[in-house]
Amino acid sequence: MLESKLIRLKEDLELEKPTMIVGLPGVGLVGKLVAEHLVDELKAEKVMEVYSPHFPPQVLVNADCTVRPVSNSIYLGRANERDIIFLVGDHQSTTSPGHYELCSLYLDLAEELKVSRIYTLGGYPTGKLTYEETILGVTNSTDLIGELKGYGVEFRESEPSGGIVGASGLLVAFSLMRGIDAACLMGMTPGYMMDPKSAQFLLKMLCSILGIEVNTESLEKKAEEMENIVEKLKEKEEQQKIQEIKPSEEDLRYIG
Amino acid sequence: MLESKLIRLKEDLELEKPTMIVGLPGVGLVGKLVAEHLVDELKAEKVMEVYSPHFPPQVLVNADCTVRPVSNSIYLGRANERDIIFLVGDHQSTTSPGHYELCSLYLDLAEELKVSRIYTLGGYPTGKLTYEETILGVTNSTDLIGELKGYGVEFRESEPSGGIVGASGLLVAFSLMRGIDAACLMGMTPGYMMDPKSAQFLLKMLCSILGIEVNTESLEKKAEEMENIVEKLKEKEEQQKIQEIKPSEEDLRYIG
Amino acid sequence: MLESKLIRLKEDLELEKPTMIVGLPGVGLVGKLVAEHLVDELKAEKVMEVYSPHFPPQVLVNADCTVRPVSNSIYLGRANERDIIFLVGDHQSTTSPGHYELCSLYLDLAEELKVSRIYTLGGYPTGKLTYEETILGVTNSTDLIGELKGYGVEFRESEPSGGIVGASGLLVAFSLMRGIDAACLMGMTPGYMMDPKSAQFLLKMLCSILGIEVNTESLEKKAEEMENIVEKLKEKEEQQKIQEIKPSEEDLRYIG
Amino acid sequence: MLESKLIRLKEDLELEKPTMIVGLPGVGLVGKLVAEHLVDELKAEKVMEVYSPHFPPQVLVNADCTVRPVSNSIYLGRANERDIIFLVGDHQSTTSPGHYELCSLYLDLAEELKVSRIYTLGGYPTGKLTYEETILGVTNSTDLIGELKGYGVEFRESEPSGGIVGASGLLVAFSLMRGIDAACLMGMTPGYMMDPKSAQFLLKMLCSILGIEVNTESLEKKAEEMENIVEKLKEKEEQQKIQEIKPSEEDLRYIG
């Protein structure tokens, strides 16, 4: 395998202007959590697998002790009388050229399937342990901005200022040349841990945009568990701050 | 040389559903030790050499002062009325894409030679200086699990939890698409040194699966030598633990 | 996308022996600042875009919240009755092979457009916080040296002694085989920060060579701002030196 | 430029079983010093240049302020009624695959030019600041060993035990498949600095093997300069050893 490869598990998909939703691993795993939740809830069917020499040279072990190569997968779901294509996966490319190669492969596929809109999902690292419902957006054309603002997506001049690294950004930017409207939707997230809470906010926004409703119980549960962990982290942080002050007060008394 | 290359030392191999055994360098060199021991004991013949731009750009010096490029080799042996193909070698790929390229090359060969079963051999790092006879397995289809359990191979849900990196994993996972049954058999090993003891356990299991018997003397000798080294390492470890405790006891007495 | 790719925004450019000016990111951003200033002042038109798997796998966010892939761009301007082609961009290649690939692509284009002269612009790192008006030059043939000396470009034996890394050097060296005269012009710059002051000197030299005049106000303003920052850096440096001496003098008095 | 490229400066070289001498940068620059000295002394003519995307993306500046890309070069000389092809250069490949690619290119050329013998020249790192006249050899066939021993080349079982990294080793190993006899001759060298002294010993051996005599003055001069530097390094080393002992003796007296 010298190039990334698409394996079709089902031939002749006849779709009508489907929407493509991309949730690959990234900051806070926010995009991955949302896309995989939708795949589950919409009972989407796996129709393609993607293997690439740019993925880690690794296999993962299933619960039944069989192994599978690291891969990305294409699922096909249906909601609100619309076909939805999901791109999810274990890893993104480990090399720069690989990111570009995979992006081309996915946009070739999007063209073939006559995708009319792409939403890539990601996390926007805030560096802070606080919740924010804000969903930040960027697009590949100004036409989409008004529409998405209507749903509450926020657009901030030149933000993220450091750009967007990886598939979420490249797919939005390069889809322009294929004539496909695309936006990247980002949930706010601390950035250094899995964030199902942020995923919950992003899921809510995405469902509103797609005009669908899904059960969010499993994600809510994960979010609650994570909220407890974060609560404890915060308490610890507070205590450390207090302890950092206290001893120095004691030290002062010793001196005084 | 821009791609990995197979050099045939012998043309027109006519084999009947051979078994392929893969023992390339990996954790504890367990797989390599077992496969090379079998190559020696079965007097298998070298029939192919593999060179690759993804191996280190290095040559090795033979005892007679001639040099040879870093390579992988294919040997052909026969045991229990069965043809056995061995894949052994000096190195695995140094790059991610190289792992995928070499895996494709080996599976093309396996298809050509009508290989009906692949066993890749490896080590499972335990991080502990203790012996365990356990052989852990993963497969590319659930059909094989029952058969291998019959020989005593252990299967643990989703283990190894970190997946398997390198040829041993990739060959098992990708052989599924070629219609070849495959399993990876792993001996338990500390992980940070050559482990002929673990290789001995794995060899015993493999021979039982293949229905063959081989002289294991040379491997036993290596294992005994290593056992002595490990024994000394353990003693040292114990002494260090004792010394780590002692001073703190003395410290307590000083305070009391 | 497996190779660097040139997108033509405008077909059939009919140019007469144009000059090509290359200002890609490099030491002190000197070349980039000069070339982009000229693009603005000459109201040059973007005629091509270059994308490459060797650029970082990243998109940049425009002020209007649309994204664009990291790219290099070709602009076409006109001054002093001459067509001028500008090569500017966000990044250079992130890999060694990519540098060579992009260099070939740009020289293929230069040949196609019948470019008769190439000036690549760069910075020469001095490691010192002082201004120097000197513009250092290297060429791909001794014929150009006399001509450029006439404008005041300095040529120093075997300098830069460490060679030149990246597009500025490669384009000059390899254009020789295409029969295109080329020189690299370098402004003196500390090397560890953006240097619009050095860019100002280089711009002046380049305009003199091209026989054109342009408004330099915006660059002057940037240079003044930077000069203020440098002034403060220098003052700080001086104070540190003084403070480093003072305490040791006090120490001496304690001993004496 | 996506692949390494050979530029012919002179067409239709008609040679009769030439010898090829390879002196590329390596340990102590020993091989490079010897081969370039012979190119100078035999007034060999540059007949080809090699450029590669696997060389650093860098140009070097000539004394006359023109630049040239990093390259390897093929020179043609004649001595003792024999054609001699020299392969010398600024750099070796910066990537593993590049080493293999360039090795193929050079052996294709060797086949085309009907090269009958290849000597690659290198340094063998001893880690010690002492001179040794020993020249260590490895070959691609046992046939050559006797012949080279006759000239005084030393052959040590399985040495260098770490193998040989880079062009010197690969060219010897892979020339076997091209039916070309080849040996790598290595001078003993500390390993961490340019070593014209070791080059002098290796040159002497090579001249004896080729049955030629050359003026070695320039190399001797460089060797003398280096010898002085080494002498001073050794003195310093000795003094440091003495100083390391002395203070501890004083310390003892304080205690006693």
Image: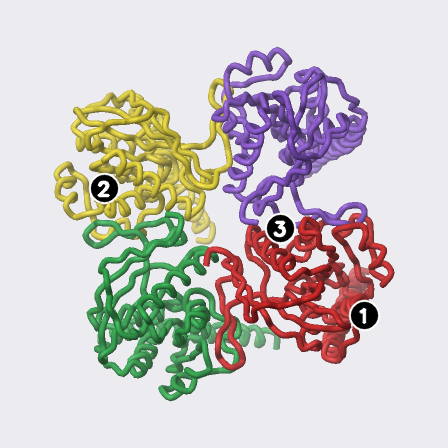
Chain colours: A red, B green, C purple, D yellow
Query: What is the x, y in percent for residue B42?
Result: 21, 72
Query: What is the x, y in percent for residue B171?
Result: 42, 68
How busy is the neighbourhood of tag 3: few (under 14 within 10 Å), some, or many (20 plus)?
many
What amino acid is found at the position of numbered circle 2 in the picture?
A: Ala
**Local SS, label 3:** loop
What amino acid is found at the position of numbered circle 3 in the picture?
A: Pro
Mark 3 lies on residue: C57
**Local SS, label 1:** loop
Please tell me whether mark 1 or mark 3 is closer to you in this view. 1
Q: Return the mark for residue D182.
A: 2
CA distance for labels 2 and 3: 45 Å
Q: Residue furthest bottom?
A: B150
**Local SS, label 2:** strand
Look at 74% across and 73% down and name the residue there: A79
Q: Is residue A30 above or below residue D69?
A: below
Determine whether label 2 and label 1 are within 8 Å by CB.
Answer: no
* Discs 2 and 3 lie in a common subunit: no
Q: Return the mark for residue A211.
A: 1
